[in-house]
Image (spheres, rainbow, N blue to C red):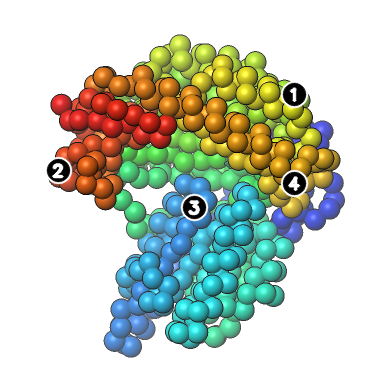
Amino acid sequence: MLILGEILRPSGDGGPGAGNFFTEKNMAYERKTIDPAQIQAQRDICAGIARRFEEQGRRPLALVDTYGCQQNEADSEELRGYLALMGCGFTQDEFQADIIVVNTCAVREHAEMRVLGNVGALNHSKKNKPEQIIAVCGCMVQQQHMAEKLKKSYPVVDLVFGPHELWRFPELLKQVMDRHKRVFAAEDSQGVMAEGLPRQRDGKVKAWLSIMYGCNNFCSYCVVPYVRGRERSRRAEDVVAEARELVAAGYKDITLLGQNVNSYGRDLGSELDFSDLIRRINDIPGDFLIRFMTSHPKDATEKLFKTMAECEKCAHQLHLPVQSGSDRILKLMNRNYDSAKYISQVELARSYMPDLVLTTDIIVGFPGETEEDFEDTIKLVEKVRYDAMFTFIYSKRVGTPAAKMPDPYTREEKQRHFDRLTETANRISGEKHKEYEGKTVKVLVDGETGREEYNLSSRTNGGRLVHLKGDRSLIGRFVRVKIVSSNTWALYGEIV
Ligand code: SAH
Ligand code: SF4
């Protein structure tokens, strides 16, 4: 499948990975699956490392620090899975840790700056504990210029590896331990499929379930397709088997993850699409909820909305990033839809699910975005009325087409737009939350807040946050609550 917009023709200047801009050649992905024997070999390496620590008579401690999206959270669970096989306990204290893994994000500069600041500060913990091993992995280091930067300017870092190398983290760590040398593994790649990695999950109620990796959309501002490789779907059998395990283990809230879940299965050459996958998971016996993210509007279908409405376990929640309300900007972004198509999709989705909770992402200050373009975004937001919005100021990413577009507006102008959009978003969220007051809704209790008055947190079917007062034994249970008050960010309820 090729999606070649005019602005996306290979340009030849340096991109984030060695491959620069994508070409027809690197869009043609040949599925590469890691042999299960190789994963077993990684597990064996873990066992060897565990024995080594045991002989030294100590239980090592590891710290995994995660930046960015849910996919990174899911990847960190695999890193922890491997570390647990190495006999590690876990800590949040960098001065106690024997192994530190920083799992990074590249979507915006702000996240990269935070990572670099925090990695630089690890000088102190390493000085205290010279045998400490510091690894930096994830999307940021898959960009060649960032891997170089760590190599040159951050001698405190012992190991650097990109998302495509995660499956062989034990082998890379062992190389550092054996050779007492720095190891760098972030070759340009279209990505591999690896099943059967160990995983240490974060919670007991909510679980991430990756259904696909990578992205083929090449939105002109976005670095993800360069660092995460081509779109590749897990086999439906593997996804459903994992969902079954989660339900059997008592998980009640399963979020299916992919950069564009609506194109699930296209690369598998099977008839089964994302809606069919939802149905298969919905058929698993048990009391649980299915959520998913992210949906690209260009690929959302009536079949999907119908499936969501018909599957009783599928939450009526849709994260449908619009990015901009201006057709001119959407074109420059290479999003492949216009505002009219987007709005008609929202209307269609709401016709199937009148109670749909709808959220979105919006970028403010895309290169050349004018006052008029911005007003179009405000108009769209006022029309659609999102339950919640994630708003970002455009961040220039090395090697993406947008990075070369003229960008005449100042940071102050962009900030002014950003503030106005945030105010609009907050007002609408507050108004939508107010509508819940006095109503009784079913929620899943998912954790503690640490506060006395409203000590428990929970989510509605549509994913809205509800604070409650109740016994902690309710965690993991569905209960009915009456909403008594609300604000922009949350609802407050009483158990009925
Ligand atoms: N695959 C998802 C999004 C992944 S990135 C999708 O297409 O919806 C999450 C969000 O970060 C995007 O939706 C976008 O709003 C924002 N984003 C991505 N690149 C950005 C950039 N260069 N500057 C600012 N925001 C960006
Ligand atoms: Fe980035 Fe999402 Fe567009 Fe893919 S679909 S390029 S991840 S914004």
Quadrant housing residue 267: top right
Location of mark 1 (residue): 372
User: From the image, which quarter does the C terminus lie in?
Assistant: top left
Residue at mark 2 to residue at mark 3: CA–CA distance: 32 Å
Residue at mark 2 to residue at mark 1: CA–CA distance: 52 Å
Determine whether label 1 and label 3 are within 8 Å by CB. no
Location of mark 3 (residue): 72
- Determine the residue located farthest toward the top in the rendered image: 351
Residue at mark 1 to residue at mark 3: CA–CA distance: 36 Å
Q: Earlier in the sequence, mark 4 or mark 2?
A: 4
Left or right, residue 348 beside residue 487: right
Residue 368, how many percent across, how many down? Answer: 79, 35
> Amino acid type of disc 3?
Asn
Residue at the image position 34 percent from the left and 54 percent from the top: 201
Which residue occupies the foreground of this view, 467 or 427? Answer: 427
Location of mark 4 (residue): 400
Q: Which mark is residue 471?
A: 2
* Local SS, label 2: loop
Residue at the image position 70 percent from the left and 69 percent from the top: 148
